[in-house]
């Protein structure tokens, strides 16, 4: 089992620390997310959402919804009847709610405070579940995946977008330098929480990506599992069907 990487200390549960971290950086999160990825995160999100186009899901759950950018993009591309977003950070949800109100999408996008490993929903409720850059923050990855499977309808699809570790030269070396040295420095400058952005490369390094994650999805009950690397393996899209 991979080492548990936490944002701050070892005394509190990982999920408590993750919630605190995102509460701390919520006001600068969107800016830094786009800035640090050079805007490529927008392209990656669209590619992940397009995995659901053929399925035409009408009720979607977005786990670790954060400030809602992935859900807003899904609303635009898929036009479902409704998306429900759940997140452990109230600070991130407050930003999402401001966006929902400003865009007058309250009838299409609903948010809830909740634990990704104990989702506050009935079994077999959603046509699709999405998670963008959230699974590596789960305290217990296997429990979280099993609960995502639980709330999916039979035949429903899960789509997970997450950072992975490139292996080819020189992408691997450039990626490591950028994530290890540049990202924490810029994060500290703008967010005033240096630890949040040094946690990012640590959590990616510890995450069981590629075929290891596919195996965990299968163990959680998913079938037809696939891994689709993006940008030389910097990011990956994982899909599975209940």
Image: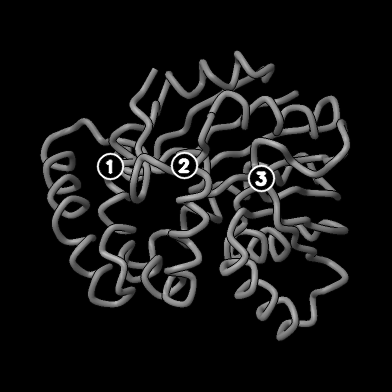
Q: Position of residue 83 (x, y in %)?
A: 78, 57
Q: Residues within 10 Å of mark 1 (few under 14, many from 20)?
A: some
What residue appears at the point 88 percent right and 58 percent down from the top-left corner? 81
Q: Quadrant location of residue 146? A: top right
User: What residue appears at the point 86 percent right and 50 percent down from the top-left corner?
Assistant: 58
Q: Nearer the viewer, residue 155 or 212?
A: 212
Image-quadrant location for residue 10: top left
Q: Residues within 10 Å of mark 2 (few under 14, many from 20)?
A: many
Asked whether the residues under the numbered discs 3 and 1 touch, taking CB atoms below 8 Å apart as contact, a structural biologist would say no
Contact between marks 3 and 2 (CB within 8 A): the answer is: no
Residue that numbered label 1 is attached to: 202
93 on left or right of 34: right
- Pointer 3: what residue? 115
Find numbered disc 3 in the image and state the secondary structure of the residue it sits on.
loop
Residue at image location 71% in from the left, 25% down from the top: 241
Could you tell which of marks 3 and 1 lies nearer the N-terminus? 3
Question: For the C terminus, which image quadrant?
Answer: top right
The x and y percentages for residue 86 are 69, 53
N-terminal of the two: label 2 or label 1? 2
Residue 13 relative to residue 63: left or right: left
Which numbered marker is on residue 14?
2
| Label 2 close to label 1 by CB (< 8 Å) | no
Q: Measure the alpha-carbon separation of dots 3 and 2.
A: 12 Å
Q: Secondary structure at mark 1?
A: helix
């Amino acid at each position: 089992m991979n080492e548990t990487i936490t944002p701050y200390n070892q005394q509190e549960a990982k999920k408590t620390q993750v919630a605190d971290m995102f509460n701390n950086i919520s006001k600068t999160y969107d800016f830094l997310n786009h800035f640090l990825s050079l805007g490529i995160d927008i392209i990656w999100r669209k590619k992940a959402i397009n995995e659901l186009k053929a399925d035409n899901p009408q009720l979607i759950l977005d786990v670790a919804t954060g400030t809602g950018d992935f859900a807003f993009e899904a609303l635009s591309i898929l036009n479902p009847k409704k998306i429900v977003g759940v997140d452990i950070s109230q600070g991130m949800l407050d930003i999402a709610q401001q966006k929902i109100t400003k865009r007058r999408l309250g009838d299409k996008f609903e948010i809830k405070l909740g634990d990704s490993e104990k989702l506050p929903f009935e079994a077999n409720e959603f046509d699709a579940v999405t998670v963008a850059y959230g699974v590596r923050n789960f305290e217990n990855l296997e429990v979280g995946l099993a609960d995502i499977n639980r709330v999916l309808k039979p035949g429903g699809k899960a789509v997970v977008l997450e950072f992975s570790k490139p292996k080819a030269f020189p992408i691997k070396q450039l990626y490591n330098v950028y994530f290890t040295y540049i990202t924490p420095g810029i994060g500290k400058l703008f967010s005033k929480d240096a630890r949040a952005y040094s946690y990012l490369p640590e959590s990616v390094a510890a995450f069981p990506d590629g075929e290891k994650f596919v195996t965990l999805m299968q163990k959680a009950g998913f079938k037809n599992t696939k891994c689709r690397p993006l940008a030389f393996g910097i990011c990956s899209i994982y899909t599975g069907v209940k």
